Every structure is written in structure tokens, then in C-alpha cells.
């Protein structure tokens, strides 16, 4: 029998680099430098070089990275932070956790990201920061967002958990990695992310040396000198085993992104022209690293389509089924009846197909066949 099609093929990916990974992990075991060992420093240096950013500060996960970023900016309770209403909960959760006020913005319904035009009307005299999310692996239009932030003196924290390796081109032709354009960038190394470890992990990126110092201090109990605590911080570390794994996997990141793009191109070619199906739109000034291959269908068809695919053994996911402002947890921050039509629509229309680095073509053929079959009959 054929192996079941996975949403994310972490086993297949590991099998291909098993020797290298095993050796890296065993080396950490042998040296027993489990916390802040040399591999953590080495990984920070390697990721700085890869991203072209002055400072990478590793931490325990992508949610911590966002929290530490907002702590480092010195925001005060009641300050407003603008984020998209269509994202993973962590983005808005940390804002609320710190006593700040999340202000949820609409997103472009074709690109799935927030834009400067959608952010601008939400700016008040309490607004202090914007958290753009490079959703599904494609950059927000950062030039416009940074211009807006400069005009209104706002901080920008890029949530780059889904787009490590994506590149954005400015109008002067310069190219930067996502996560390195705002004041601070954050990312996650959750196993299924584009650069994933074998447990939890995260990092912050910045070009600002003073901010980097502050971030390091906050992530380490607010201390620079052991047992002398300057500020209230937290304990958020990337462990050495995860750093050793990430060091190995970073070498393959571009190959993995290319494989994801190859799969996305094949999906695009197979689905183009099907009525009732909208392909993911590529932004002209950003590359795409396809953390997700996300399509839109008509709301009335989606459940049927999901059931059809599941019955054929094809995994399919909805990122995200509920707008953040409808989540019970955010009710204290949201006016009754608050609604954003684009986000509302997206939550009913989007679905994501398997896309990753190791899928066999025969598996992709099966997925394509099942999707086409469904639309032939509606
Ligand atoms: C995964 C993710 C996070 C959180 O990362 P963790 O490492 O799971 O804490 C934050 N924001 C976005 C957009 C994500 O996709």
C-alpha cells in the first residue's frame, strides 16, 4: 500500500539528512553543553550571514520572540498595536498579554497580508507599533509600511514565522530578507515552519545594536551580568540540540524553498482556469517561500471540497477558520458586532493543500486529480 500523503513530510526530510543531523545531535550530547553551548552562537552567526542582518538573538519559540520584541520597545499598557485580524493567534495574543491593545486590521483578499492603506485609517495618537505578518511565506509590501511607520513614528515588528527565506525588493532595486526590514523581526523554528527544528525554537532579528542588547537582556531574566537584574525579563532560550539541528538545516533552506516553489508551480499549472477556484496570487515585489499553498474557493463549496479530499486520503487544512476578533479571548478588546468583511470572507473560503520539500510527484498527481475531480462535478 502507498504511504499516506502527509501535510508536512518531516520524516522524509529527516531521512535525507539523517547522517548529518544525528552526528550534530550526538556531538552536543557528548559535550553536554546543552544550554548556550557553542552551537547556539554558531547558529546565530550563520543565520545573521544568511539573512544579512546585524543581530540574531535566538529564543525558545516564535511566540516568545514576539513578546520579547514588544517588551524591548518599551511600550506602555494602553498603547495600541496594529496587527492583521487574519493570522495565527500568537501575533495578537502577545499584544494583549503585555497589557497593550490589539487593533486588528483587514488584509488584502488576494495577497492575504495587511497593507499600508489598510493600516493607515487605524492609526490614532495611542498607536505605537505595527506587527505585519508575512502570511503563508510572502512578504507584506514593506516599503509602504515602513514609509507609513516613519511618517507616524511607529515601531514595526515583522512576524516572520511563516516566511524565513523570502526576499522583498524595494523600488530602488535593493533586496532584503523578510524579518530584517522592520525595527525588529521575529521568527519561529516550530518543526513545520520553513526552517524548523525538532522541538520548539525561535529568534529575533534586528540591525539596531542597542535593541539587540535589550532583547538579549530581556530573554535572559533582565540581566547582563549574572545575578544583577536591570529589568523584568523572562527565560527564553534556544537549546543547543535545536541549534545544532538548525545549523544543519539552514544549509538546505534554499533547496527546500525551491522544492516548495516547484510544487506550487505544478499546482498553479494544474488548477489554472478551474471555475470556483482562485490560485494564490504572487506579489510582484516579493519572492514566495510557500509555507502554505493556500487557495480560495466559494464558501458554499468549501466543506464539500474538504470532505471530498479527506475521503480520498488527502490532508487539507484551513488556516484560519475564525477571524481573531471573533475569538472569545479577544472579546474584551473588540466592540460588539465588529466585523471585517474581507477577513470574514477569507475564513470561509481558504484552504491549504500539502506543500513541502519531499513530496513525490505521484503524490502530488493524486492531490491534483482529486481536486480537479471535485470541480468537474460541481
Ligand atoms: C507559528 C507562528 C507563530 C508562533 O510560533 P511558535 O514557535 O509556535 O510560538 C507566530 N506567528 C505566526 C504567524 C506563526 O505562523
Image (tube, rainbow, N blue to C red):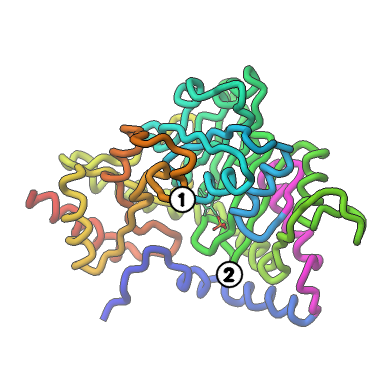
Q: Which residue is mark 2?
A: 198
Res 80 → quadrant: top right
Q: Who's the residue at 66% across and 67% down the image? A: 242
Q: Who's the residue at 81% across and 51% down the image? A: 217
Q: Position of residue 205 (x, y in %)?
A: 69, 45
Secondary structure under tag 1 reads helix
Assess whether residue 103 is covered by the magenta stretch. Answer: no
Start and end of the magenta stretch?
31-57
Res 227 → quadrant: bottom right
Q: From mark 2 to mark 1, how far is it between C-alphas?
A: 30 Å
Q: Nearer the viewer, residue 159 or 278?
A: 159
Question: Can you see residue 302?
Answer: yes
- The answer to whether marks 2 and 1 mark residues whose Cβ atoms lie closer than 8 Å is no
Question: Is 184 placed above or below 256 here?
Answer: above
Q: Earlier in the sequence, mark 2 or mark 1?
A: 2
Which of the image's four quarters has the N terminus? bottom left
Neighbours of disc 1 within 10 Å: few (<14), some (14-19), many (20+): few
Left or right of 300 in this view: 54: right
Q: Which residue is mark 1?
A: 329
Q: Nearer the viewer, residue 31 or 317?
A: 317
Q: Who's the residue at 92% across and 56% down the image? A: 228
Assess whether residue 32 is covered by the magenta stretch. Answer: yes
Question: Is 88 placed above or below 29 here?
Answer: above
Left or right of 195 in this view: 48: right
Q: Position of residue 249 (x, y in %)?
A: 60, 62
Q: Nearer the viewer, residue 26 or 321?
A: 321
Amino acid at each position: 500500500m502507498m504511504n499516506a500523503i502527509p501535510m508536512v513530510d518531516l520524516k522524509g526530510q529527516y531521512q535525507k539528512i539523517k547522517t548529518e543531523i544525528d552526528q550534530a545531535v550526538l556531538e552536543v550530547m557528548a559535550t553536554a553543553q546543552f544550554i548556550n553551548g557553542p552551537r547556539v552562537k554558531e547558529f546565530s552567526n550563520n543565520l545573521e550571514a544568511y539573512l544579512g542582518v546585524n543581530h540574531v538573538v535566538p529564543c525558545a519559540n516564535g511566540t516568545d520572540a514576539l513578546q520579547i520584541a514588544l517588551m524591548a520597545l518599551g511600550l506602555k499598557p494602553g498603547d495600541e498595536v496594529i496587527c492583521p485580524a487574519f493570522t495565527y493567534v500568537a501575533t495578537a495574543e502577545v499584544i494583549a498579554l503585555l497589557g497593550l491593545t490589539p487593533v486588528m486590521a483587514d488584509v488584502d483578499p488576494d495577497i492575504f497580508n495587511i497593507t499600508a492603506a489598510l493600516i493607515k485609517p487605524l492609526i490614532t495618537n495611542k498607536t505605537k507599533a505595527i506587527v505585519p505578518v508575512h502570511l503563508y511565506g510572502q512578504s507584506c509590501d514593506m516599503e509602504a509600511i515602513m514609509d507609513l511607520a516613519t511618517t507616524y513614528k511607529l515601531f514595526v515588528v515583522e512576524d516572520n514565522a511563516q516566511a524565513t527565506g523570502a526576499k522583498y525588493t524595494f523600488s530602488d532595486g535593493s533586496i532584503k530578507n523578510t524579518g530584517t526590514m522592520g525595527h525588529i523581526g521575529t521568527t519561529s523554528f516550530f518543526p513545520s515552519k520553513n526552517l524548523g527544528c525538532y522541538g520548539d525554537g525561535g529568534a529575533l532579528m534586528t540591525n539596531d545594536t542597542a535593541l539587540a542588547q535589550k532583547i538579549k537582556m530581556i530573554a535572559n531574566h533582565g540581566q547582563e551580568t549574572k545575578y544583577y537584574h536591570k529589568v523584568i525579563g523572562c527565560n527564553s532560550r534556544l537549546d543547543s540540540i535545536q541549534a545544532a539541528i538548525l545549523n544543519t538545516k539552514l544549509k538546505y533552506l534554499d533547496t527546500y524553498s525551491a522544492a516548495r516553489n516547484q510544487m506550487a508551480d505544478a499546482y498553479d499549472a494544474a488548477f489554472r482556469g478551474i471555475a470556483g477556484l482562485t490560485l494564490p496570487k504572487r506579489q510582484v515585489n516579493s519572492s514566495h517561500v510557500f509555507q502554505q499553498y493556500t487557495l480560495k474557493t466559494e464558501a458554499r463549496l468549501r466543506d464539500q471540497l474538504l470532505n471530498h479530499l479527506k475521503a480520498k486520503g488527502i490532508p487539507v487544512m484551513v488556516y484560519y477558520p475564525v477571524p481573531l476578533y471573533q475569538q472569545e479571548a479577544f472579546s474584551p478588546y473588540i466592540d460588539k458586532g465588529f466585523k471585517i468583511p474581507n477577513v470574514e470572507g477569507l475564513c470561509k473560503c481558504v484552504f491549504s493543500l500539502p506543500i513541502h520539500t519531499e513530496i513525490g510527484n505521484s503524490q502530488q498527481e493524486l492531490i491534483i486529480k482529486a481536486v480537479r475531480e471535485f470541480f468537474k462535478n460541481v
